[in-house]
Amino acid sequence: MIAMNFSPKNEVWKDVDLSDAKEVLHHAFDLYHPRISIASSFGLEDVSLIDMAASIRPDFRVFALDTGRLNEETYECAEKIMERYGISIEWYFPKTESVQELERTKGMFSFRESVENRRECCGIRKVEPLNRALNNLDAWITGQRREQSLTRSGLNVVEVDKSHGGIAKINPLSDWTLDDVWSYVRRNELPYNRLHDAGYPSIGCAPCTRAIKPGEDQRAGRWWWEHPEHKECGLHINESETGKDVENI
Ligand code: SF4
C-alpha cells in the first residue's frame, strides 16, 4: 500500500490497492461518476488514463483547458483520442476579456519577464478555467507522477483538494515511472502526442515548453528560464503539513 493522508473522505479507500491504477480508477468511478472527470493535457499519462477509463465505463468524462497557446500536435492528439474512444472532450477556454486585457497591456510574451507575470498568464489561461471545470465535480483525476519533479515528490494517490472546495483528487499513476507509462502506451498501441518523439516528456503551452536533454529533470522543459521551485502553473495546490499552501506540480 502507498502512504496517503487519511481524512474522513479517504476512509472509503482503505480496501483499495492504491498501487493498481485501474483498480483506483474503477473505485473512483464507483464513488463519484458522473461528477468525476479526467483532466487531460494529452500527454502520455492522460492518454493512458483515458484508455483505462474506457475499459471500465464508456461514459467516462474528460476535460481539457484550451489556453489559446497549445501546440498543433496537442490538438491532433485530442482528435485521435476522440475518434478512438468515441468520446467528446469538455474543453474550457479562458475568459475573452481577461486575455484581451493581458495581451493589450502586456503583449504576447509577458510571461517571460517575471514569475509574477508568468503566474498572471497561467492564472488567466489555466487556473480560472480549471476552477470553472471543477466547480460541478466531486472529484478529478490527474496524470501526475511523483517522479516528474521534486515539486511532485509528496504526491498521494488520493488527496483532498483543499484549494478546490475539498473535492477528491485522484492520481492513479502517482508511483509510475516514465518507463511504466511508455510501456503501457506501447503495449496497448495508444495514440500519443507527437511532441513526445521530439523530446518533450511534458506537454504544456507551446511558448513555455521545450524538449529536454538526456538526464534532465522531466519537467526541465517547462518555464525553463525559471528556478525549479517556481515551476508550477497553480493547477495543483495542496496544503503542506505545516498548513502552508504548497504547489506540488
Ligand atoms: S504556460 Fe505559458 S502561455 Fe500557458 S498559461 Fe502559463 S504562462 Fe501562459
Image: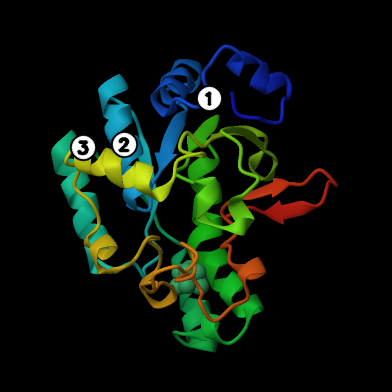
Q: Which residue is mark 3?
A: 187
Residue 106 image-quadrant placement? bottom right
Judge the density around disc 2: few (<14), some (14-19), many (≥20) Cα neighbours within 10 Å: many
Q: Quick one: label 2 or label 1, which is nearer the N terminus?
A: 1
Q: Which residue is mark 1?
A: 18
Instruction: Using the image, tell me which numbered label, if any, was put on residue 166.
Output: none
**Residue at 41%, 20% in the rendered image:** 26
Are dots 3 and 2 in contact, CB under 8 Å? Answer: no
Q: Which residue is mark 2?
A: 50
* Amino acid type at image mark 3: Arg
**Disc 1 CB within 8 Å of nearest ligand 1 atom:** no
Which colour style is shown? rainbow
Measured as percent of width and height from the top left, residue 48 is found at 32, 39
Q: CA distance from mark 3 to mark 2?
A: 15 Å
Judge the density around disc 1: few (<14), some (14-19), many (≥20) Cα neighbours within 10 Å: many
In which quadrant will I find the C terminus?
bottom right
* Amino acid type at image mark 2: Ile
Q: Quick one: label 3 or label 2, which is nearer the N terminus?
A: 2
Q: Is residue 137 visible?
A: no
Is 158 located above or below residue 134 in the figure? above
Q: Residue furthest top?
A: 15
Q: In front: 88, or 142?
A: 142
Are dots 2 and 1 in contact, CB under 8 Å? Answer: no
Is 78 located above or below residue 61 in the figure? below
**Which SS class for mark 1?**
loop
Q: Nearer the viewer, mark 2 or mark 1?
A: 1
Measured as percent of width and height from the top left, residue 9 is found at 67, 21
Is 230 located above or below residue 189 in the figure? below
